[in-house]
């Protein structure tokens, strides 16, 4: 187990997240912006998270679950609801597949599925398929709370899991608790 305190600055309209932390070795700052990941400051050139996922994947998972409603306004992607619901830990979800538009005008599957909870209408699960892998990376949001009086609802806890190809959660890779 690894415990750290990080600051996540999320910019939904520019599809960006900046993550910073004071670690025993040094301060680090990394950023994911419009799909491009960069480490802005660190003592080590090859900085990585001390978990089984890459830093870019971690940043993308947090950004996607925190900004899921805004992702549907992205004009470079097409979202299509799958006709069949799925069950995740006893809850019914409607999967919504994200397809990225290419320059040729056709769609290329990106391997991201946003799952809308039928009961709450929240997108509180996002699946990422790994090419050539039998497993999924799953990010889940919990304990959604309205932030101040502006009507925005965000998860107070985010967890990232390795899951089987049918969506059964197998191993928790990261747990994030937000305090605001």
Image (cartoon, helix red, strand yellow):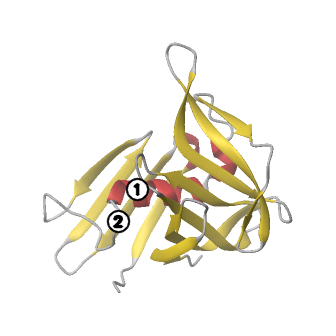
The answer to whether residue 120 is visible is yes
SS under mark 1: helix
Q: Position of residue 53 (x, y in %)?
A: 36, 64
Q: Is residue 83 left or right of residue 179?
A: right
Query: Which labelled disc corresponds to residue 57?
Result: 1
Residue drawn at point x = 42 percent, y = 46 percent: 131
Q: Is residue 80 left or right of residue 25?
A: right
Mark sitting earlier along the chain (2/1): 2
Q: Quadrant of residue 98?
A: top right
Disc nearest the viewer among 2 and 1:
1
Residue lying farthest to the right in this orientation? 119
Residue drawn at point x = 36 percent, y = 54 percent: 56
- Position above or below: 37 against 80: below
Q: Dot 2 corresponds to which residue?
A: 20
Q: Quadrant of residue 20?
A: bottom left
Q: Position of residue 35 (x, y in %)?
A: 42, 41
Viewer-side residue, 132 vs 146: 132
Q: Is residue 137 left or right of residue 90?
A: left
Q: Position of residue 10 (x, y in %)?
A: 51, 55
Residue drawn at point x = 58 percent, y = 42 percent: 13
Q: Is residue 114 left or right of residue 44?
A: right
SS under mark 2: strand
Residue drawn at point x = 61 percent, y = 61 percent: 166
């Amino acid at each position: 187990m690894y415990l750290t305190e990080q600051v996540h600055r999320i910019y939904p309209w520019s599809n960006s997240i900046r993550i910073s932390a004071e670690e025993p070795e040094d301060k680090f700052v990394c950023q994911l912006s419009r799909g491009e990941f960069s480490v802005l400051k660190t003592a080590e050139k090859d900085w990585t998270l001390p978990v089984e996922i890459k830093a870019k994947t971690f940043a993308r998972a947090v950004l996607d679950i925190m900004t899921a409603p805004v992702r549907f306004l992205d004009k470079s992607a097409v979202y299509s609801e799958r006709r069949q619901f799925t069950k995740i830990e006893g809850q019914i979800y409607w999967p919504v597949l994200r397809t990225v538009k290419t320059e040729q005008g056709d769609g290329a599957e990106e391997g991201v599925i946003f799952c809308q909870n039928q009961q709450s209408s929240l997108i509180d699960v996002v699946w990422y398929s790994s090419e050539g892998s039998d497993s999924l990376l799953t990010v889940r949001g919990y304990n959604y709370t309205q932030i101040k009086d502006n009507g925005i609802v965000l998860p107070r806890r985010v967890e990232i899991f390795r899951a089987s190809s049918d969506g059964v959660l197998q191993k928790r890779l990261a747990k994030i608790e937000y305090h605001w």
